[in-house]
Image (cartoon, rainbow, N blue to C red):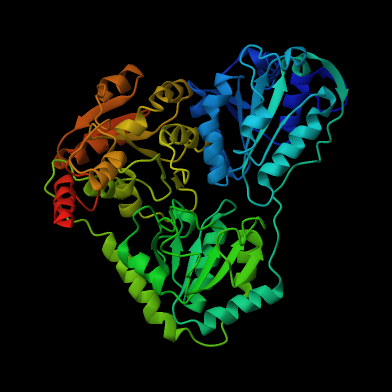
Amino acid sequence: MDNTKTTRRGGDLLVASLLAQKVDRAFCVPGESYLPVLDALHDVSDQIDLVVCRHESGAANMAEAYGKLTGRPGVCFVTRGPGATNASTGIHTAFQDSTPLVLFVGQVNSSMKHREGFQEVDFAAMFTPLAKWAAEITDPARIPEYVHRAFQTAMAGRPGPVVLSLPEDILSDLVSSEIDPGLLAAPISGAPTEGQLSRIAELVEAAERPLLIVGGGDWTAVLGEQVAGFAERFGVPIAASLRCQDYVNNYHPNYVGHLTIGAEPKLVERVRQADLLIVMGARLGEMTTAGYTIIDPAKRGAMLVHIYPDPEELGRVYQANLAINAGAPATVEGLARLQPKTGNTKRGNWVAEARADYVASLAVTPRETSVDLAQVVTEIRKAVPADTIVCSGAGNYTAWAHRFWQFSSFRTQLAPTSGAMGYGVPAAIAASLIYRDRTVVCFAGDGCFQMSSQELATAAQFGARVLFVVVNNSMLGTIRMHQEREFPGRVYATDLVNPDFVALARSYGLAAERVEHTADFGAALQRALAAKGSALIEVVTEKEAISHRTTISAMREKAKASQK
C-alpha cells in the first residue's frame, strides 16, 4: 500500500496510517460497520496479521496482551453497539494495567447520528471513563492525525488505552491526505533531576529498613536488571506490586516477594516495619495495599518516595515525602549511576531475612487432597523453559500460581491487575502467536475458563500452541470464600455445573485429558507438552481446598469460634 499522498477511501487511509505506526498484527471480530477497513486489510495481509477472534472481549484482551508483551499499542477492531460493549472489559483491563492499546469501533453513518440508529452508541461518552482518550473521527482527511495521536497518547506518560469511533461514511468517502512515514509515535515520560536522585541515595543510606516496590506499565527487561543492581549495591529488598512478579528476577537475592491479594503475612509485616518505601511505577492501589491498610494513607509511618509517570496520580491517595514525576526507564537509568557512600551492612540482615522468608514461602507442604495444586504448579515450572509465558485470569486458583511460580525474566507473566475473569485464555493465545518459539502456559479456573473458552477456536485456526490447565472445583472459588467468611454455611449462587472440558477441548482439535490425582499429573503433563498443537489438562480439585492457605471447614470453625 502506497503511504504517499493519493486519493483513496478512508478505510485505506486508516490502514496506511497503521502501517506508518509499524503495526504488524491486529485482533478483531468482523462487523459490517467497518467493512472498508477489512477490505483494506486484505491488501496488506502480508504486512498486518489479522487475528479473527470469537468474541470482542477476547479480541480486546488479546490486543491488551500484545501491548504488554511488546510495549507498542495492541490494535483491536470491533463493530458498533454490542461489539463495543463486549470489548469494554479489555479496555478497562488496559486502563488499570497501564497497557498501551488502540481500539477502533465502527459507528453508524454520520447522517444517522443522534436518532438511535441501529446499534448506535455515543462511544466517546461511553469510553471516556475507561480510556486515556476517546473520540470520533468526523473528517476522513484527519484520519492520519487521529491515528498518530491515538498511538502517541496510548504510550505517553502512564500508558493506557485509546478508543476511536469510525462512522461508516468516513471509511467509504474518497479523500486526498498525506501520511508522513517518519512520524512514528513513541513513549514519552519525564525524568528525575540529579537532585532527586541524590536525595533517594541519601534517604536509602539513612534508612535501616528500606523497601523498594516496583510495578506499572513502562518496564523492560533491562530495567529489571538495573534496579536489582541498585538494590544490591545499596542493600534494599525488592517487592513486586500486584501481578508484576516478572519485573525483577525472582532468583535475585534482593527479591523478597509479591504484594498480591492475600500477600504472605511476613512480607506484609515487613512493609509495615519499613522506615523508607520507594515505590516505582506502582500506583499503590487497593489490591497491592490490601484495601489501603498495609500502607495507610492517613497514618503512614515510613518515609515515602513515589515515582510515577502521571503527575495527577502523585498525591492523589498517598502524600509522598519525595514525589517524582518520571517514567521507570529514566529513573532506573539514573539509579544505575548511583554508588553508595557507605557500606550497607546495617541493612544486610534486613535484606537476608526478607529473602529467607520469601524462599521459605515457596516450600510445598503436601495436603490431604486428591490434587494438590501447589505440586501441580511446581511440577510444571520444573518441566518448562525459564522463558515460559504464564497467563491467568482471576479467581482463587491464581493464588497457587502467584505463590509457587518463580519468574526469572520480564514479560513471562500475563495477568490482569484489573481482576478480570476470562483474561488468561485470550492472553495466552496472543502470546503464542507473537512468540511462536516459546512455551505458553495458561492457568484458568472453571468459571474463568468458561468466560473465554470459545477462543480455543481462535487458537486452533491460527495455530497457537498453549498448555491450558483448567482447575475444576465446580464453583466460583473467590466468591465462595468471601461467602464462607461473611455468611458461613449459607452457600448460594456460587456452585457451577460444568461441561466436559476434555470433550470440549477435543472438539476444537486439542489434545486433552483429565487428572483427578496428583500422582497422575506428571505423565499427563509430559503428554501435553509433547502435543503438536495446544493441549488442555483438566485438574479436578475438591471444593474443600478453597485456597492455598485454608479449607472451607477451617473457615467455618473460625467463624463459629468468633461468634462465641
Which of the 4 image quadrants contains residue 226?
bottom right
Along the line of sight, the residue nearer the viewer: 374 or 211: 211
Quadrant location, the C terminus: bottom left
Does 498 sit left or right of 532 as displayed?
Answer: left
**For the point 71% across and 71% down, which residue is it?**
193
Q: Answer yes or no: is residue 207 visible.
A: yes
Q: Is residue 249 above or below residue 138?
A: below
Quadrant location, the N terminus: top right
Which of the 4 image quadrants contains residue 219?
bottom right
- Rendering coords of residue 432 (x, y %): 46, 35
- Rendering coords of residue 463 (x, y %): 45, 25
**For the point 37% across and 80% down, which residue is it?**
349
**For the point 46% across and 32% down, which residue is it?**
426
Along the line of sight, the residue nearer the viewer: 432 or 46: 432
- Rendering coords of residue 446 (x, y %): 30, 32
Q: Residue furthest left?
A: 368
- Rendering coords of residue 176 (x, y %): 88, 22
Does 97 sit left or right of 460 as displayed?
Answer: right
Q: Answer yes or no: is residue 253 visible.
A: no
Along the line of sight, the residue nearer the viewer: 208 or 235: 208
Q: Is residue 254 above or below residue 394?
A: below
